[in-house]
Image (cartoon, rainbow, N blue to C red):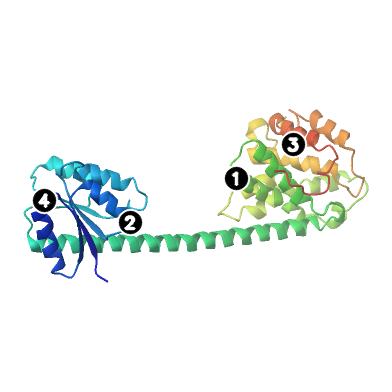
Amino acid sequence: MSDWILVVDDDMFNLRMASHILSSEGLKVSCQQSGEAALDFLADNRPDLILLDVHMAGMDGFETLEAIRTDTDLVKLPVIFLTADEDVGTETKGLEVGAMDFIRKPFVPEVLLARVHHTIELTRLQENLAGEVAKKTQELVRQQERIERIAMQIARALSGAVDAKDTYTNGHSNRVAEYAREIARRAGFSEREQNNIYLLGLLHDIGKIGIPDAIIDKSDKLTNEEYELMKTHPEVGAQILKNITEFPELATGARWHHERYDGKGYPDGLSGEGIPLEARIICVADTYDAMASRRSYRDVLPQETVRAEIEKGRGTQFDPYFADIMLQMIDEDKDYRLREQVEDFD
């Protein structure tokens, strides 16, 4: 199929000359004698290239091109200005409004044909390249989404393996992750930040995989030696997760979710804003679920008791800002439905 050229010039001689030269090469040519007529023509037609005179009665070439560029369907349509001017300012303005090239009048047939063929080929090359880039980008996005799904499935499998060590708290890590994500959402975190905190919450207890089942399932009070061993799980978890170098923040929730805002936590005795933000969020979520779920040594605590403990720990155990968000969530939970289940918070 022949390439289609629209020639716009208010001089009939120029139109006939351009049409003759282009048609001799087998190109399809349409002619219009004004900018207004060209716009009407373009409302229903899509040529491959426009040759547009700069100086015309009524709308000049600059005004016509600016009007063409306001139509989203015509933004990428290539335009070459036709001009007898030798003024550099004319070329500069033409390029600023979106012309791809200039052709001098009177026409030199070889130059006219070369510029037209070159511009059409360049435009198609750019379109093909843009299409390939878009295609490759979509493939990369699909691959990235698949990798993220696999990573999330692995994280859930690992957290499930840890939670399965204690039949009384199975599902704990997933609930903590959900609560942490909701706290982050209410705190104004971006969707990506919320998802990252969810992942940190899923793996915050990964270090318990190294704690003997007898200690985790013990229904009596832990001995001092057993408690000290239990307290090693944040460091063990951080050691496991630090090997995931593509996501170094993963170890944050594991290592510091037992730090306290007043500096009396473990393993490093961090305090206040010295505790990573994500860990401060997970700390509140973890403590809530610990009190609101059944344990080997006790049953679920009443909601009023859970709320009182969160309130009591505000500013000492917990970051007061995130404690306030957790208290708001508790107050909205009139029927204590957050307990031992994941709810839709939206």
Q: Quadrant of the N terminus?
A: bottom left
Instruction: Evaluate if marks 4 and 2 touch, with contact meaning CB atoms under 8 Å apart.
Output: no
Please give the residue where the numbered disc 1 appears in the rendered image.
Answer: 191
Q: Which mark is residue 2?
A: none
Q: Which mark is residue 11?
A: 4
Spatial CA distance of label 4 from label 3 is 86 Å
Instruction: Evaluate if marks 4 and 3 touch, with contact meaning CB atoms under 8 Å apart.
Output: no
Which marked residue is nearer to the observer: mark 2 or mark 3? 2
Amino acid type at image mark 3: Gly
Spatial CA distance of label 1 from label 3 is 30 Å
Q: Nearer the viewer, residue 119 or 147?
A: 119
- Mark 4 falls on what kind of element? loop
Q: Which mark is residue 44?
A: 2
Q: Is residue 160 left or right of residue 89?
A: right
Specify few, some or many for label 4: CA neighbours under 10 Å numbering under 14, 14-19, or 20 or more.
Answer: few
Q: Position of residue 117 (x, y in %)?
A: 19, 64
- Mark 1 falls on what kind of element? helix
Amino acid type at image mark 1: Glu
Please give the residue where the numbered disc 3 appears in the rendered image.
Answer: 265
- State which quadrant residue 209 falls in: bottom right
Which marked residue is nearer to the observer: mark 4 or mark 1? 4
Amino acid type at image mark 2: Asp
- Mark 2 falls on what kind of element? loop
